Image (spheres, grey):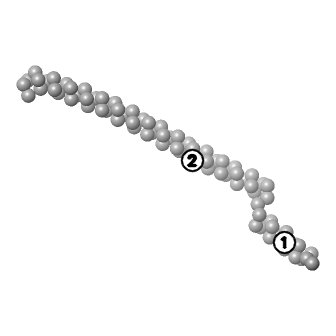
Amino acid sequence: MLSAKDIEKIITAQKEIFYNKEDLDEKFEEQTASFSKLQTAVDGFAKTTKDAEQETMVFGHRVGRVEEWAKRAGDKIDL
């Protein structure tokens, strides 16, 4: 049979090892905040990628226009 001292040890160990409701709430709040930061970072990365893709398309269009202009100029000066 357990003595009062054994029960005290079990209660002390339980308090040290297991989370109580307040501890769990705090952990979930930390995880939520961390996830929110991660989600914001991913959204920022997605926007940066989209912007870079659009800039690449615009640059390609500009290069195409310069190439067309160079061909027309070359035809006029017999190059």
Q: Residue at (81%, 67%) from the top-left corner?
A: 14
Question: With respect to residue 10, does 24 lie above or below?
Answer: above
Q: Residue at (64%, 47%) from the top-left corner?
A: 33
Amino acid, disc 2: Leu
Label 1 and label 2: CA atoms lie apart by 39 Å
What is the x, y in percent for residue 20? 79, 58
Among all residues in the image, which is located at the extreme front?
1
**SS at mark 1?**
helix
Q: Residue at (76%, 60%) from the top-left corner?
A: 19
User: Label 2 belongs to which residue?
Assistant: 38
What is the x, y in percent for residue 35? 61, 48
Question: With respect to residue 29, does 57 lie above or below?
Answer: above
Return the disc, 1 or 2, that comes first in the chain's sequence.
Answer: 1
Dividing the image into 4 quarters, which one contains the N terminus? bottom right
Dividing the image into 4 quarters, which one contains the C terminus? top left
What is the x, y in percent for residue 32? 66, 48
